[in-house]
Image (spheres, rainbow, N blue to C red):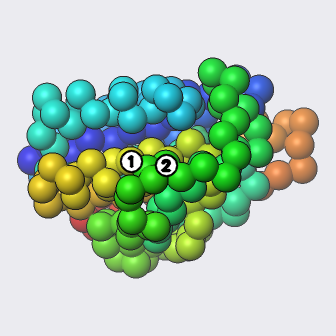
């Protein structure tokens, strides 16, 4: 079985994005899954156009999208993506949509189709902090989760798909007063979540 796991490119002046660092650090096989790894640009216009051909070419059996949520104190499976783009800072192409729908004809929201409670429990059982998040924000991460779930629905691909936000790693917080988790912990937390799928 194939599992597509993605992380984002660095944004907001950060030199790295812990979500893609985590993706790179995951083994190529986890349980029954062979991983298909990809880096997604932190860009409203290019994020889904990067992921879509991968889904079409690979027909994965599941999709886990990862992103950075600096300031969060746990690995957080997201419950829902909403049909809103409202950027508080420009994306990597300088776009900052304000109060716009992702798809004017789309539903207000899509729920994650990952077993988020089971995944959060598996991360906790691995000795790491986890919590369900009820908002993926209104920036590029929420956008990618919404667009991907919308595409899977429209193309009748009935596969589990959702988003997990990860905190900063220690290298990023030397000049900030913010929570971080070592990259090795992010990797083992996400590995535990994948095994719970
Ligand atoms: N986090 C941002 C976008 C890219 C990322 O890693 C977000 O939460 O929207």
Residue 102, label in figure: 2
Q: Is residue 167 visible?
A: no
| Residue nearest the viewer, comparing 101 with 10 | 101
Q: Earlier in the sequence, mark 1 or mark 2?
A: 2
Q: Disc 1 vs disc 2: Cβ atoms closer than 8 Å?
A: yes
Could you say where residue 129 lies in the image, as x and y percent from the top left?
Answer: 59, 68
Residue 135, placed above or below residue 37? below
The count of marks equals 2
Residue 151 x/y as whole percent: 27, 48
Give the label, 1 or 2, closer to the camera. 2
Which residue is labeled 1 in the image?
147
User: Ligand 1 is found in which quarter of the picture?
Assistant: top right
Residue shown at 34% from the left, 48% from the top:
148
Would you say 80 lies left or right of 139 here?
A: left
Q: Is residue 19 visible?
A: yes
Q: Secondary structure at mark 1?
A: helix
Residue at x-position 70% and y-position 36%:
96
Q: Is residue 57 above or below residue 146?
A: above
Camera-side residue of 141 and 34: 141
Q: Is residue 175 left or right of residue 21?
A: right
The residue positioned 76% from the left and 45% from the top of the image is 88
Q: Position of residue 64 (x, y in %)?
A: 35, 50
Q: Is 102 placed left or right of 38 in the picture?
A: right
Q: Quadrant of residue 18?
A: top right
């Amino acid at each position: 079985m194939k599992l597509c796991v993605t992380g984002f490119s660095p944004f907001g002046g950060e030199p790295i994005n812990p979500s893609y660092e985590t993706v790179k650090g995951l083994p190529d096989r986890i349980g029954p899954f062979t991983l298909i790894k990809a880096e997604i640009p932190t860009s409203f216009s290019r994020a889904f156009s990067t992921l879509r051909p991968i889904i079409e070419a690979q027909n994965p059996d599941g999709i886990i999208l990862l992103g950075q949520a600096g300031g969060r104190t746990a690995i957080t499976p997201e419950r829902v993506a909403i049909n809103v783009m409202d950027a508080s800072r420009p994306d990597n192409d300088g776009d900052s949509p304000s109060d716009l729908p992702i798809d004017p004809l789309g539903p207000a929201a899509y729920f994650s189709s990952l077993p988020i409670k089971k995944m959060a429990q598996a991360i906790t059982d691995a000795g790491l902090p986890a919590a369900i998040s009820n908002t993926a924000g209104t920036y590029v991460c929420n956008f990618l989760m919404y667009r991907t779930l919308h595409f899977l629905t429209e193309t009748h691909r009935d596969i589990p798909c959702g988003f997990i936000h990860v905190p900063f790693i220690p290298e990023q917080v030397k000049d900030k007063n913010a929570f971080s988790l070592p990259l090795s912990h992010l990797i083992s937390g996400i590995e535990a979540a994948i095994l719970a799928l």
